[in-house]
Structure formats: C-alpha cells, structure tokens
Amino acid sequence: MLLVGSAARAADGDPARGEAIYQRCLACHALEHNRVGPRHCGLFGRRSGSLPDYAYSAAMKKYGATWNEETLDHFLQNPLKAVPGTKMGYAGVKDSQERADLIAYLKQATSDPKICK
Amino acid sequence: MPITTLHADPITPVRRSFLSGFGKITLSASAVALLAGQDRLALVGRASAQTTNNDVTILNSALGAEQQAIAAYQLGAESGLLQKPVLDLAVQFQGHHKQHADALAKAVQKVGGKPVAPLKDYGFPKDKLKSQNDVLAFAATLEKGAVSAYLGAVPILTDRELAKAAASILGDEAMHWAVLRQALGQNPVPDAFVS
C-alpha cells in the first residue's frame, strides 16, 4: 500500500472494513437522516456546511471545502483541528488505513441508490 | 448490524433471568457527581479559552448523543414491541441516559457554554422496527456508537476530571451494549478492546 505522508487514500481502503468502522459514527450520524450530525447520503461532491435542513456551526459554514477523499481524510484525522469551532467533538480517526477504509465505505454507501433515495 | 440476521426469539430463559436480575440494579449517580463537581469545574476555569471551548464542544456532542439515545428508547418503549423484562431494561437504560444528559448539560453551563437542545426528529427508521429484536438491534447500534463517541472524547477533553467522568459514562454505555448483545443472542463482549 502506498500512502502519501499520513494521508489515507480511499482507493486503498476496504469498504467492508470501513462499514465496521462506520459503526463508531452511529451515535451521532446516519446515512439517510440528519441526527446529531448531518446525514451522509450525497456526501461526496457536497459543499461543507451546505445541507439546508441541518444546523451547522458557523465554522463549518465558513469552511469552504468540497467533500472528497482528500478533504474527508484531512477532516476525519482531527475534526477540531481541521475546523476549529465544528460541532463534532471527537478526537478523529487517527489510523490512516482506518480512514482509508472508512472513506471507501462512505464513497460507496453515500451514493448507493438503495440506501440514499 | 444487519437486522435481518437476528434471531427470532433470542430471550432464552437463561438470558431472561440474567436480564431480570440486571434490571434490579440501580446504578450510582457517581457520573453525575463527577461531571457536576465544583472542583473539576474550577480546574476547567483555569484552562485557556480555546481548550475550554473545545471541552464545551465535546460535552455538547456527548449531550446530543445522549438526547438521541433517550429519544430512541422512548420510541422503543412506546412501540409496543418490547416485552417484560426487556421493556423494563430499556426504561432503565433510558434513565441512565437521562442522568448522563442532565449531568452533561450542567457541566456545559458551568464552563460557560450553552447546552444543545434535543432535536424534534431524529429520523429513526420506524418502518424497519417490526419486532423486539429490531428495536434491540437498533438500540445496540446507538450504544456501540456512544461507546465510540466517548472513546473519541476522553483523550481530548482538556480537563482530566471531565475525561474521567466521560470514561465513567463510557463504561455504562459499554454495559448497555453488552447486555443488548446478550439479549440478541450475540456474544456480549466480542473483543478485548472497543474502538
């Protein structure tokens, strides 16, 4: 596996392992619905802080990223450092392979028409 | 967790007895006292503004998850799908989450933050909850998520006493998760470490 620095690459990730890692997110997130955190369906290509029916922090509204493999990798590594003021009070996914797996799962699941209608 | 793989009737007599006994246990309010204690809040008061802001964010994230859990157990209790003693267990677990939420809200206020309010709608998958097992499996996913959420909070809380209190809640959530897995006929403690 070739990783650039500590960056995770979804191409190197295993969606099946990522699905198991996604279980960690379920206290706050769901694919289909906004809960404590915003829904993940349609995540890739979405502008950060742009869901009209979710109350983001001011910091996330200003973040100005478009979610893709690279921006997710950066954010998920340390959310509070990546976006100071984010509502996501979580240490992050520190292991680059785990991030790659999680991002690979998110890429697959959030565009699955059977899940994200 | 694939709900469709769950057993049709997982509450065997042995497990029923186990659950019944568990339901009689009253947890202490130590987590509440830990979170609301003046001594640790004084420590937080000495932290920098940014680190205190992060602690508020972290505590509010935990509070939001607790509020969601309260709503989920309410949905389960009102579903008509839970039978005693599982219903009693669900109500007991909801009570724990209420205690966690109350303590977290007080802690947020005492460090100068504003506690988040519960959502009006969590978008729970009501149409997929058709049996007691479905409800238990759904609750188990939230409890597992809560364990992970607290695991992601403990290392970054600036105040170590708040971190200790969060770890105390983590332990309670892990017990919930294990008991729910047991009720579902699954290995209650599948791994040596949680993540």
Image: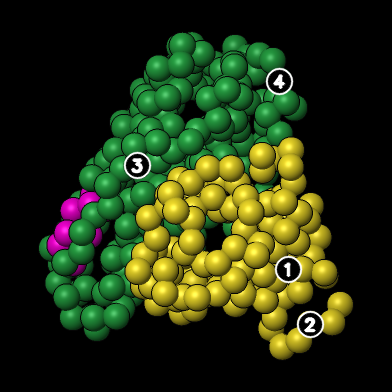
Chain colours: A yellow, B green
Asked whether residue B8 is in view, the answer is yes
Which sits earlier in the primary sequence, circle 1 or circle 2?
A: 2
**Chain under callout 4:** B
> Residue drawn at (40%, 60%), measured in percent from left and top?
A56
**What is the magenta range?**
B103-111
Asked whether residue A19 is in view, the answer is no
- The front one of B143 and A3 is A3
Q: Position of residue B63 (x, y in %)?
A: 33, 51
Task: State how far apart marks 3 and 2 are (Cα).
Answer: 40 Å
Task: State how far apart marks 4 and 3 are (Cα).
Answer: 32 Å
> Residue flagged by tag 3: what amino acid is it?
Leu
Q: Is residue B25 magenta?
A: no
- Residue B7's mark? 4
- Residue A100's mark? 1
- Residue A3's mark? 2
> Residue flagged by tag 4: what amino acid is it?
His
Task: State how far apart marks 4 and 1 are (Cα).
Answer: 33 Å
